[in-house]
Image: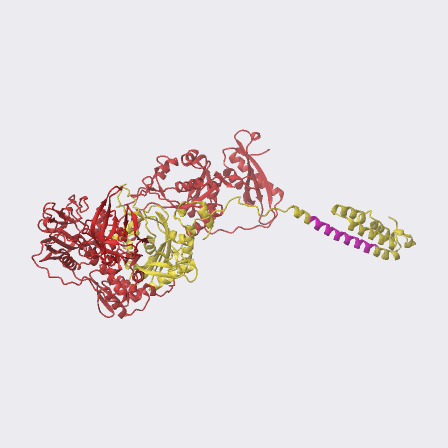
Amino acid sequence: MRVPLSWLREYVDLPATETGRDVQAKLVSAGLEVETVEQTGGGIKGPLVVGQVLTIEELEGFKKPIRFCTVDVGSANGTGEPQEIVCGARNFAVGDKVVVVLPGAVLPGDFAIAARKTYGKTSHGMICSGDELGMGDDGTHGIIVLPPEYEPGTDAIELLELVDEVLDIAVTPDRGYALSMRGIARETATAYGLPLRDPALLDVPAPNSYGYPVKISDPQGCDRFTARTVTGLDPEARSPIWMQRRLQKAGMRPISLAVDITNYVMLELGQPLHAYDRSRVQGTIGVRRAEQGEKFTTLDGAKRVLDAEDLVITDDRGPIGLAGVMGGANTEVADVEIDAETGEAKGTTELVIEAAHFDALTIARASRRHKLSSEASKRFERGVDPEAGPAAVQRTVDLLVLLAGGTAEAGVTEVIAPSAPRTISMGADHPDRVAGVAYGRETVVRRLQEVGCDVYGTDELVVTVPSWRPDLAFPNDLAEEVIRLEGYENLPSTLPTPPSGRGLTERQRLQRRIGRALAGAGYVEALNYPFVGDAAFDQLQLAADDDRRRTVKLVNPLADTEPALRTTLLPGLLGALRRNDGRGSHDLALFETGLVFLPSGEETKAVRLPVDRRPTDEQIAELNASLPAQPRHAAVVLAGAREQAGWWGKGRPATWADAVESARALAREAGAELLVAAAANAPWHPGRCAALSVVVDGEAKVIGYAGELHPRVIKAMNLPERTCAMELDLDVLEQAGQGALVAPRISTFPVATQDVALVVDADIPNVVVEGWLRKGAGELLEDIRLFDVYTGEQLGEGKKSLAYALRFRAADRTLTVEEASAARDAAVALAAEHTGAVLRGA
Amino acid sequence: MSAPNKSYDPVEVEALKPEEIERMRDEALAAFEAAADLDALTHAKTAHTGPTSPLSLANREIGALPPQAKAEAGKRVGMARGAVNKALAARLAVLEAERDERVLVEEAVDVTLPYDRVPAGARHPLTTFMERVADVFVAMGYEVAEGPEVEAEWFNFDALNFVPDHPARQMQDTFFVQGADGKKTDESGVVLRTHTSPVQARALLERREPPVYVVCPGRVYRTDELDATHTPVFHQIELLAVDEGLTMADLKGTLDHMVQALFGEGVKTRLRPHYFPFTEPSAEMDMVCYVCRGESVGNPDRPCRTCGSEGWIELGGCGMVNPKVLTACGVDPEKYSGFAFGFGIERMLMFRHNVEDMRDMVEGDVRFTRPFGMEI
């Protein structure tokens, strides 16, 4: 809502010194979001006057038509002589009244006017367009032609109300009343403690039986309908400048007198109005729901197919308006046409004025259904004062009579569905209890009265809310009114005392720990969008029946190529890797933790639960069953050097082993034992892929994979060579955590170390050999560590040597060499038995 | 070695004459002093303290003296040897110190060399900032609550008093999820949550009976295209307190506490009336610009980039929990009241750390994230 300050002053006697910024501050603190205060005509300086065109000489020989004019500007130029002005516009004739700026003046934008030579003549000033005066473009780019009644030489700065301030207010959905000058004026008056001149307080004739016939078939959709008829209108009558200017400042374009008046009254009172050309309406005006599929052309020329829920205004032929949204082309007020032969003006001379009150929800739905938002629908959706209709019609009729020479017919139609005033019961101390401030009953009552409520009662108040505040329905709504008018800025600041908390949950702690562990290991966190498409899965070389292709899909994705939600973190994370690589960072280690979305296909349809009571546990469980599984995953990707080359020596490229190690790091943080086994799973290299498992409730579960990516994936995604990745399910990893650690017992007796090198078949995994060694070594084994892997000709084809360092120690004595050797031999023997390992060199 | 000779005249033993012993001692001291390095000292040590050195040989002769002479000769030789050993040790210490100094100088390195063998990693500032905000409240006794990102409309809208078709429901540009039937309509009842507020309803339903004091950080979604100031995927943190007798003054105090914990002592907040379906009364909350502290307002000589010389920075929305929300979550609004607020993490990070372009927080460029380190 754009509010010209000059217009606002018509209803509230603001001190003359108050600026737009002052009013803004007051209204903001009362809860109206005044986004900007615009200065119109800033920097403008006269002389800017009314002129009358005396002569026009067409100048020939220029690229565009140019006119040399003489203009009577009265005594504004000091001489009273005609002013000579060159002008490029053509929308005026001899005798027209125009706006003339004289040398010495300054127009908006610091545009200083001086006499200057142009097109072979000297131009002593300029004939102005609306644009040049900062009035906004009227769409014609032509100069302003004024109504004939103004005297040459009259100051046009004042006439055109060029200097003003306009408050632009963003109105929240609950406050329909603030979409009117009347509503803003009420808030302003309250904020300043000044009286309000309510523009809706008009003498309105009582309804009678001889008004235009109206029949309401749907009183739920339309509970009020007021109609009046005005005849004898002068089709040539134009909107006065003051009205045009107010409309312009409020952001609307002047169109024709009848339309301008209905718009003006809507802005003033908040009541949308419609004017029908009576000669084009046939029979009774009706209000009903549309028939499914009924066709109708709105004022904007769009042909619309109606829905059975749409509310329409009809005459005997059918729809003439989409109620509360837009009128029909078939009863539009006609443009003026001048008969070329007789010079007689033809146009609309009789109007039926409608002011109705429609159901907010019906209008909101229709507006959305037809993707048609109008000034009217915007107001009806947010709630229009149901009692404003008669005053709005009266105001419209008055203006038509005044400005278009019309005659108001005596018939007054008013159809009203019965309704009772709305009352709310509220403890007088309720606002105090909501705010934590002792306002006292007197203040509460006074503030509610300022809002427009009638208030009765002492301890328990019975509050009748004003018709224009449909948003006031509960005690807290009233409390808000009191608190905001008393000033949110005056609320004290107190701290409640919550019960002692338990801190973060284990899961929340783990999540933080994981981030720190990975960052500590050199990984940088990236948070990626979860949107994916089939292309991403194809690039990852996922099989057609891969579970990860079963996605949650969006109805309205941002990009049609990415209509689904991720089932793996890798597409996003690899995208970030590629982006970094493309920007010149080649040694990369990135990580992400976040939700993935895994529909089972068994999701139920989401039910709409009640809101007037707590749903049952079964209902909540049923609702949750409509959601896909959303486990939290962790993933890393690596490319380039894991360790950089430098003065210390060579670097080391990131490998599959780094990817696997990242999983081990996470398992360590989770206190879980991670089992690593060879696997072949897209998108990984089949020979360099590890399945990662944990044991949960006695059952081994694969929670993810790690390794080097498949060369085809690297090619398809245009990734750096040998890019590696790991991804696992953090939720399951967390479940595998073994709880509070049992502290190790530390023996202080000396250690006995023994090294063994075992030759095994190349395809036997280290974990297997190490496992048997560990088992065979028995209780004396403190630690075992693989320190070398060797393959070579001396071992023979298909063999490898694994070298382990074993550390033995007893809790109660110094081990003898014999004891340590015996333990080592037992370890080797068991490994040999199960893996065919042979002691190297044996 | 000679056997003891009771009739032996000590004067007759040339080597044990006092002047001889003195000479031997002085020669040894001079030799040590003359030794220029440890090798020379080793030679001098052998020559003057070794088994064949004059003093050692003289010492051997003592045994041949008559008992009455032994004590005096022994004392004389012993004193001389003591002096020699002491001088040797002193010279050794000097020469070793000289050597050590030389070696350490030779071993000196350029300690300014870099060692970025494994460059440092970092957590994303959005993550760490959410943690930091949450920690302020955890310290007060709040707990951290979570909820799903693909959420039922009932939680995202209905339970929060967004009635169907209310214009407020349209204010948020919602991603709708397709139902199992694959129909491309917005009727599945499932959406990407548009705010963290559904966690309010979940927290109330899960905890069943107040008091409930929770914060809910998380990821939310709206259908905005990515540009310098918008992103379709962003983060919010939500706070909910429901207890007996909570007031708007408590809300204000809690906000004041938060901004002071995050932005420093003395930073004030301001509430402005607003509208949200799930709070009544509702407010928008601003904090005084922590950079200019409001001094840039009307002061064109000192413009403030952080607040655009407005003096205030808009943080987010808040208010007293609408009794309808309490009712929908099974909490008796006659007995309990509550307050809630929520704000965007991206926005707060943008002005706290002078981030100029939203895309920097989205694209995962390591050059942006790395300087933020582990904590923020």
**Residue B90 magenta:** yes
Q: Nearer the viewer, residue B365 or B87?
A: B365
**Colour chosen for chain A:** red
Q: Residue at x 58, y 38 (%)?
A: A756
Q: Nearer the viewer, residue A633 or A555?
A: A555
Is residue A99 placed above or below A119 in the rendered structure? Answer: below
> Which stretch is magenta?
B77-100
Q: Which chain is yellow?
A: B
Q: Position of residue B349 (x, y in %)?
A: 41, 52
Residue A228 horizontal side relative to residue A477, left or right: left
Q: Nearer the viewer, residue A331 or A831?
A: A331
**Residue B133 magenta:** no
Residue B110 horizontal side relative to residue A618, left or right: right
User: Which quadrant: the N terminus of chain A?
Assistant: bottom left
Is residue A597 placed above or below A797 in the rendered structure? Answer: below
Q: Main secondary structure of the magenta part?
A: helix
Q: Position of residue A224 (x, y in %)?
A: 15, 56
Residue A505 seen anywhere in this rendered image of the structure: no
Q: Residue at x 75, y 45 (%)?
A: B39
Q: Position of residue B69 (x, y in %)?
A: 88, 56
